[in-house]
Amino acid sequence: MTLSEKQQKFTVMIGQFIGWADKNGYGLTLGDAYRTPTQAQLNAQAGKGIVNSLHILRLAIDFNLFIDGKYQESTEAYRPLGEYWESLGGVWGGRFSKPDGNHFSLEHNGVK
């Protein structure tokens, strides 16, 4: 699968994900999606990401989660969303060694 095809698949998955979240009472707002290589490097230097972030390739997005109007910060609050995302074939950041519950991506060349 080419990168473009994978990006298109990711976009469709995001649409399904947002629809599912809304249907199940989860409020979402968009967080970080595209990230420049420079920003990824700065984030990595600050300990808040990795240099080869999938955000650079447009294969990752962060969402802000609201339940009953209250912003959720814990990875655990994202678990049902993460499990649904995984059922679509995506990678949920809540499973990372340093959990990142609001991160949703599509693996590419071994990068999650």
Image (spheres, grey):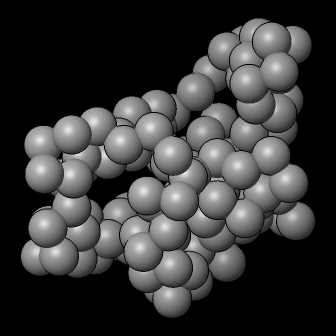
Q: Residue furthest bottom?
A: 87
Quarter of the rendering containing residue 56: top right
Q: Position of residue 105 (x, y in %)?
A: 59, 59
Q: Please give the count of numbered marks on the rendered protein.
A: 0
| Residue 24, quarter of the rendered image | bottom left
* Residue at horizontal 21 percent and vertical 40 percent from the top: 70
Q: Quadrant of the N terminus?
A: bottom right
Give 98 or 70, whichever is nearer the viewer: 70
Location of residue 22 in the rendering, given as x and y in whole percent from the top left corner: 14, 66
Res 72 quadrant in image? top left
In this rendering, the answer to whether 25 lies above or below 53 is: below
Q: Nearer the viewer, residue 37 or 60?
A: 60
Which residue sits at x=51%, y=46%? 74
Asked whether residue 57 is in view, the answer is: no
* Front residue (pair 99, 49): 99
- The reply, left or right, for residue 108 in relation to residue 103 is right
Quadrant for the C terminus in the image: bottom right
**Above or below 20: residue 6:** above
In the image, taking residue 27 as reference, residue 7 lies left or right, namely right
Q: Position of residue 35 (x, y in %)?
A: 58, 27
Asked whether the viewer can see residue 68, the reply is yes
- The percent coordinates of residue 43 (x first, y second) are 74, 18
The residue under the point 55% across, 52% down is 75
Residue placed at 72% from the left, 64% from the top? 95
Residue 51, above or below 94: above
Q: Is residue 18 left or right of residue 87?
A: left
